Image: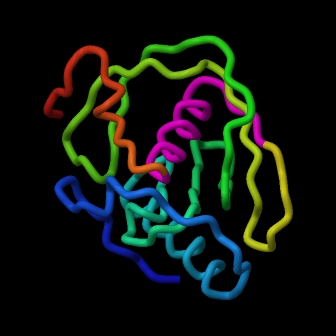
Amino acid sequence: MALRNVVKIGDPILNKKSRVIENFDEKLSTLIDDMFETMYKENGVGLAAVQVGMLKRVVVIDVGDGPMELVNPEITLKEGEQREQEGCLSLPGKYGTTVRPMKVQVKAQNREGKWQVFTGEGLKARAFCHEIDHLDGILFTSKVVDGVVEG
């Protein structure tokens, strides 16, 4: 495993749409392992591949109840609403209140290509939405309802 540099705001890659993963190989496994190591080192709860400079539909999340790897994730269900503060490893020191679903269900593949379904509420739902937005070139700042503040 290796640490990767986290791409920061201003890099145009953050606004690009990531490509679907078709090859479930050792390169993908290495990327996922490196993303987990980088996320933990940066004290994050989620990281999208685009944030380490790779336009691939890969997300890793750990909100405290164990690591989850999501390849080609799709949100299949949204319920309720929550208004909470968000931040982002690619926008250090910037936070803002966003409106996200309270509960989401996500369909995704793992590093071997096997489909699985995840359900998240609260912080986990927010993390799913935030990271999947990254895969479509969307930053949380576009969802802020009370203005972005410096931390």
x, y percent for residue 46: 50, 50
* Chain part drawn in magenta: 118-135
Compared to 130, does 101 lie above or below? above
In-front residue for pair 67/129: 129
Q: Residue at x 58, y 20 (%)?
A: 101
Query: What colouring style does the render use?
Result: rainbow
Compared to 84, does 20 lie above or below? below
Compared to 45, does 28 lie above or below? below
In-front residue for pair 27/124: 27
The residue at the far bottom in this view is 26
Compared to 101, does 125 lie above or below? below
The residue at the far left in this view is 150
Q: Residue at x 84, y 57 (%)?
A: 115
Whether residue 12 sits left or right of residue 143 in the image: it is left
Q: Residue at x 57, y 57 (%)?
A: 59
Toward which corner of the image does residue 11 lie, by quadrant? Answer: bottom left
Q: Locate the C terminus and report the quarter of the image it occupies.
A: top left
Residue 132 shown in magenta: yes
x, y percent for residue 147: 20, 20
Whether residue 57 sits left or right of residue 73 in the image: it is left
Whether residue 28 sits left or right of residue 6 in the image: it is right
- Provide the major secondary structure of the magenta segment: helix
x, y percent for residue 25: 71, 85
Q: Residue at x 70, y 74 (%)?
A: 22
x, y percent for residue 84: 42, 19
Q: Count the numbered circles shown.
A: 0
Residue 1 shown in magenta: no
